[in-house]
Image: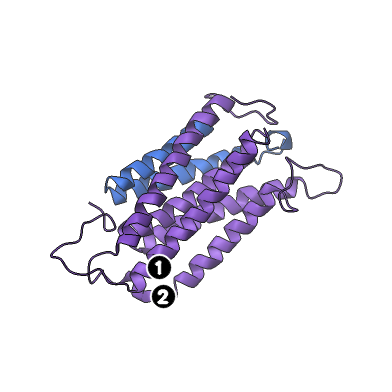
Chain colours: A purple, B blue
Amino acid sequence: MTDATASTAGGARPSWDTRSVVQIFNGLGALTVFGVVFGAYGFQFILLEPPCPLCLLIRLGMIGVGFGLALNVLFGPHVLHYGLALLAAMFGALASLRQVMLHIVPGTGSYGDPAFGMHLYTWAFIVFVTITLAIAVVLFFQDQFKPATGPVPPAVRWMAIIVMAAGLFLAGANVITTLLECGVGACPDDPTTFL
Amino acid sequence: MMAALFLAWFAAFVLAWTGRRVASVVVALVSLLLCMAMLRYHMSDDITISL
């Protein structure tokens, strides 16, 4: 049984402390990056834009960041979880920056349609940098690493369930759609069809 | 190959939700390393495979 899914023991009232607030904050961060991947799915199925190899790597980075933050919600804040999220954010920033650089020279074109004035890979780079900054700020609150003093508030438990379900769904759905697009080999350079 | 990377993250989520924190972190780190290898492949001098 995990920290956040443990039932209330001994009838003690759940209390809000720095740890619980940071767990909710981590959950919101995870839902944000998962929301970006859901948005990418919108582009894939509504605008019929199959994801390129770098786009899929950026999705993997987003899921990795979300996983690190989800662990904080599920088990409580831990430096190991933050480290994992930061590594995934670094990886995602590298992948998205690579794609920005491929198209940065005027006349070299772009991949896909822009959203709110910028392409998805540019937005992804901004998201990864913002997540890195947000984690740096959250790490200032050292009380979050103290052991829980009472039962976990129900909101944290629900946040853990929602975040884990969203992450599981996204990772599982991407296994299927990526397998259908790329098969078991390398993904096509410039995909035109999927499913 | 790319689908296998998503599968690795899926496995990490399953392990975490079933309470195996350390195992899930190990799987996630291995998955991240494989992601780096895949990124390296797509950062070849032949930029057409990155598009």
x then y, percent, for residue B26: 36, 47
Residue A174 visible to the viewer: yes
Q: Is residue B5 above or below residue A157?
A: above
Say which amino acid is labelled 1: Val
Q: Nearer the viewer, mark 1 or mark 2?
A: 1
Q: Using a 10 Å C-alpha cutoff, classify the residue at mark 1 as few (fewer than 14 neighbours), some (14 to 19) or many (20 or more).
A: many
- Side of A67 relative to A112 (left or right): left
Give the image location of residue A27, x and y in percent. 43, 58
| Residue located beneath label 2 in the image | A141
A125 left or right, relative to B7: right
Residue extending furthest toward the left: A10
Label 2 resides on the chain identified as: A
Quarter of the image that includes the C terminus of chain A: top right
> Is residue A133 shown above or below A168?
below
Numbered disc 1: what chain? A
Towards the viewer: A184 or A31: A31
Q: Earlier in the sequence, mark 1 or mark 2?
A: 1
Q: CA distance from mark 1 to mark 2?
A: 9 Å
Residue A185 appears in the picture as rendered: no
* Residue at disc 2, secondary structure: loop
Say which residue appears at 44% left-offset and 45% top-offset. A167
Residue A182, placed above or below residue A118:
above
Residue drawn 54% across the image and 41% down it: B37
Q: Residue furthest right?
A: A107
Residue B40 in the image: state x and y as whole percent.
Answer: 60, 42
Residue at numbered disc 1: A22
Say whether residue B26 is left or right of residue B38. Answer: left
Label 1 close to label 2 by CB (< 8 Å): yes
Q: Quadrant of residue B7?
A: top left
Given the image, on which type of amino acid does mark 2 rest?
Phe
Estimate how packed mark 2 is, as few (under 14), some (14 to 19) or many (20 or more) residues with alpha carbons within 10 Å.
few
| Image point (39%, 45%), residue name | A165
